[in-house]
Amino acid sequence: MRLTSSSLPAPVVAAGRAAIRGYGTATSWLRRGPDFLLIGAKRGGSTSLYFALLEHPRILPLFPSARFLPKDNHTKGVHYFDTHHGRGNAWYRSHFPLTPLRRGKLVGEGSPYYLFHPLAAERAAREVPGARILLVVRDPVERAFSHYRERRREHAEPLATFEEALAAEETRLAGEEERILAEPGYTSYAHEQQSYRAQGEYAPHLRRWLKYFPPEQVHVLVAEEFYAAPQRACDDVAGFLGLPPAPLPAAASDPWNASPSRSLLPATREALRQHYAPFNQDLSEILRRDLPW
């Protein structure tokens, strides 16, 4: 019988994870940081892209390998440059394979809050300035609704309707970004998890990353295009990373974190479309291409 974390007692799982992370930290001097960062967007398709990229023979998983974990217990992101920065660089490097194992191969991590966090880009530029930056953007209206439904499924959002959550967002986020900037160790649940509308305002968040990373070091994908043609999208990413193309298994195009869609009220959809229109136009100008939304 194959043992998984879900078949073991919680204290055993916790002890095992602590031991693995302790070993990784103790050997961090033998590990280097990421070759690429997948910075978001949350509920935008970053998980699907990350695990599709892991199918490439020259892209390695994090330590311990996420490739062999079940879907409900995968690890793709470290959240070092947003919520865990205080744990230090040795802790961060503990998540990457030993450097001798990386000859000719690349390793990256995907933390979708990086795009929206006000300090992540500056921190990343300071500590991993050579990393390539990947971003997946999705129709912001669909992204916002998906984000809300995820929080409801996790019993982490007390407001029973999306419309109530949107109405509460301004109050919930009031002063949170300012406090994160003033107190770098501060973490905000509201800023990360209840910013349903704000996280889809992609353009200013991307501009913050472009302030610290040159455009040739940044590659942006549109989620809808990735799902429609995953092989083409992954080949484009491979080229951006300096790798040859590699065929994807059929199952690699299956979406992760998928959930049954529910109807969004037409009035809410239209209000969000109007809200996002100037941000989408700005993003289109940054990317120098039309967007499918």
Image: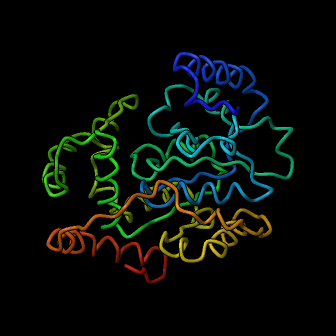
Residue positioned 66% across, 34% down in the render: 95
Residue positioned 63% across, 20% down in the render: 16
Is 203 on the left or on the right of 110, as rendered? left
Q: Is residue 152 above or below residue 217?
A: above
Is 69 on the left or on the right of 288, as rendered? right
Q: Is residue 29 above or below residue 34?
A: above
The quarter of the displayed image where residue 292 is located: bottom left
On the rendered image, what quadrant is the C terminus found in? bottom left
The image shows residue 267 at horizontal and vertical percentages of 14, 72
The image shows residue 67 at horizontal and vertical percentages of 68, 46
How many marks the image carries: the answer is 0
The image shows residue 243 at horizontal and vertical percentages of 78, 64
The one of 14 and 282 positioned closer to us in this rendering: 14
Q: Residue furthest front?
A: 1
The image shows residue 27 at horizontal and vertical percentages of 75, 24
The one of 14 and 30 positioned closer to us in this rendering: 14
The one of 216 and 109 positioned closer to us in this rendering: 109
The quarter of the displayed image where residue 145 is located: bottom left
On the rendered image, what quadrant is the N terminus found in? top right
Is 183 on the left or on the right of 170, as rendered? right
Residue positioned 27% across, 75% down in the render: 277
Q: How is the image coloured?
A: rainbow
